[in-house]
Amino acid sequence: MGMESKMFSYSEVSAHNSSEDCWIIINSKVYNVTSFLNDHPGGDDVLLGQAGKDASEEFEDVGHGSAARLMLDEFYVGEVDPALNRPTTTTNTALAPAIDIKHNSPKSNNKFLYFLLALTVIVFGVETGESAT
């Protein structure tokens, strides 16, 4: 990566918040994950729920492994500049937890649980498969 990264403001990233144009921020890096929506193991709702936002905490909380981190390089579009319009409002939306209890449906909870279950099966399946050989 010898060239300079494109810098985005938080408001620029927040405009990319749909299934046709989905960007997320993870650890101050901006990723265009639009083409990955249908392939995401947890379903597109997981990414769309974070579209245009900083998803660092959610990404880390799920426990993505090295393979997922390497995949991010494919979707990298730049960096977010903390000095450029960092959200500072004191509305409930800015301070809301990652899962908005008012708008969270049992269906989206189930998708997240299925994602975690699939991830667990994959991790333990790979470990079991490796030890058997």
Image (cartoon, helix red, strand yellow):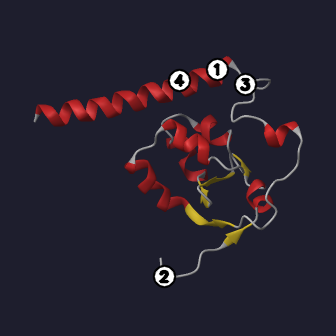
Classify mark 3: helix, strand or loop. Answer: loop
Three-letter residue code for mark 2: Gly
Q: Name the N-terminal-most of marks 1 and 4.
A: 1
Q: Name the N-terminal-most of marks 2 and 1.
A: 2
Per the image, the residue denoted by label 4 is 113
Classify mark 4: helix, strand or loop. Answer: helix
How far separated are the C-alphas under marks 1 and 3? 8 Å
Per the image, the residue denoted by label 1 is 107
**At x 81% / y 54%, what residue is drawn?**
87
Label 2 neighbourhood size at 10 Å, few (<14), some (14-19), many (20+)? Answer: few
Q: Name the N-terminal-most of marks 4 and 3.
A: 3
User: Compared to 5, does 88 lie above or below?
Assistant: above
Per the image, the residue denoted by label 3 is 104
User: Compared to 30, does 53 lie above or below?
Assistant: above
> Foreground residue, 20 or 23?
23
> Foreground residue, 87 or 119?
87
Circle nearer the viewer, 1 or 4: 4
Tell me the number on the disc at residue 2: 2
Label 3 neighbourhood size at 10 Å, few (<14), some (14-19), many (20+)? Answer: few
Give the image location of residue 34, x and y in percent: 61, 51
